[in-house]
Amino acid sequence: MGYPLPEEARLKGPFQPMRFEATVEECIVTHGEIPKDLAGGFYRVGPTWKRPTSQGTNGLLGMDGMVQGLVLRDGRADFRNRWVRTPKYLLEEQHERGMFEWTDGDWHDWRTYGYGDVKRDRWTTGVPQGTNNINVFPFAGEMVASSEQGGAPIALDPITLETKGIVNWSPKLSPGIHEPAAYGDATFTAHPKWDHETGVLYGWAYRDTAPYVTVHVVHPDGGVESRELWDAPYNSVAHDIWLTQDWMVMPFQPFLIDKQRITKQETSVFGWDPDLPIVLALIPRHDMTAPVRYITTDLEPQYIMHTLSANVTGNLLTLDGPIFNRPPFPLEQDFAAGDDVALFFSIARSHLGRWTVDLTTGKATAEQLSDRPSELPKVDERFYGRGYTFGYQVGGEIKRGGMRMNSLVVTDMTTLADQEFVIRTDQPAAVLEATFAPRHKDSPEGDGYIIVPVSWWAEKRGEYQIFDTHDITKGPICRIELPFMMGWTPHGHWMDFR
Ligand SMILES: [Fe+2]
């Protein structure tokens, strides 16, 4: 049946849903040429509104995942986008109506994330609530879509984007904040890291009761090693980590998750308690029985949502990433019942920063490395866990209490010299997360291309801009056009076919 698009900020501007599946073969190139030596796929996924729920509103995390893939080879580009056909999606498709309701779905305001428990009925009992809408990453020859701890990872065909199903290693994973609805219903982080040489994947699940985190090391053959962090300090939203040669470094920051906040306090599942200390857990990655070192810092309240990478030099561990003054989500401290959702970078600002940890004394310090607001950090992922030099981010400018994103920034993290190219000036556009692709399979770190998705949403068109890392200030060497507005996507990754 037909229905109107709800009048909500999360469905407007760049967040207008891309509710159709498209195939564009041999995409139009409006500028330059696609490098002929580039062979692989660039994939992204995002929460996409399909139809209203019976609660009348749809929290961002409860919306179905839509995956986009741009496959490049022999100088041509083919675009596809497809719904991620989760058990939830398939049930609702069969009945042609929204069938899931959430404990945080009755508010029509900023508190509705679609991330409370599902109110189970005879239709939804036994059906996982996962929506696989936050990130998509390569693993063992497949692309895997995952969400913010909402459900089991789902494998996708890298060419057709067809949903192959829940990964066969899911029964070895652990639950997040929701009770499993069926056998194999588990959860997995949206921001795993991996070892390019071994193919081993480093992930975890988090929850609001102890053990707050379970670490999962997944091998390409589907074997999973797990450890529960019984000594984890509190119920942090464990969104991202750093990987070093020896450790998974997980920051416990006072951005909290607690389902009881929904039912007992009638507020959002997420909270911010800056009185709690930032604690760093150094989790040995090669020995799941070796002790975890917890470093309780006296860092001022601040928040790293996404990481760049880390270096270990002598007894100093440097952890890089954009540092926010506070989580970029509406909080009960400054929003009241009935207020519309405030999206991401409109209420908080981040700058490139670094936490330096003295591994001898356990003393940690923080520094801001740039005056330019920036976020959506990425690196050359072949070097995850091996130290790094080059960081990529989307840069911006100050806008009221937050920031407006408009540029691509490449930073040499050893000298802090940076290059910037401003992609957006006055036109309405969303400059989305950039991703690095190597020039050749064995190119040195940072030698290659950076692909930036740009949604020119007011003109109802999309674009991929490809930059050469030799000099991004000259602008894109190639622009690939999509003849429609690309939907909003938070994250994605490159899979190399070479
Ligand atoms: Fe993220």
Image (cartoon, rainbow, N blue to C red):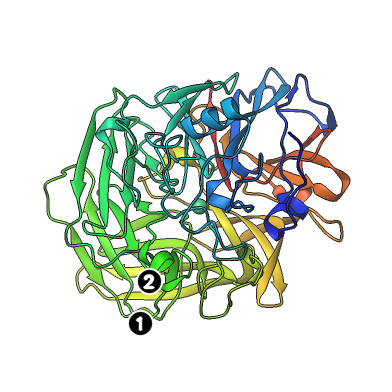
Q: Residues within 10 Å of mark 1 (few under 14, many from 20)?
A: few
For residue 85, say whether it is visible: no
**Residue marked by disc 1:** 275
Q: State left or right for residue 436 relative to residue 20.
A: left
Report helix, strand or loop for mark 2.
loop
Mark sitting on residue 446: none
Circle 1/circle 2 CB separation < 8 Å: yes
For residue 253, say whether it is visible: yes
Q: Position of residue 229 (x, y in %)?
A: 20, 55
Report how far apart the C-alphas of labels 1 and 2 lie in the structure: 8 Å
**Residue marked by disc 2:** 254
Mark 2: amino acid: Pro
Q: Position of residue 96 (x, y in %)?
A: 63, 30
Quick one: quadrant of the N terminus? top right
Relative height, residue 53 to residue 75 (above, below):
below
Q: Position of residue 370 (x, y in %)?
A: 58, 70
Residue at image coords 63%, 53%: 57
Q: Residues within 10 Å of mark 2 (few under 14, many from 20)?
A: many
Q: Position of residue 29 (x, y in %)?
A: 82, 29
**Quadrant of residue 400 in the image?**
bottom right
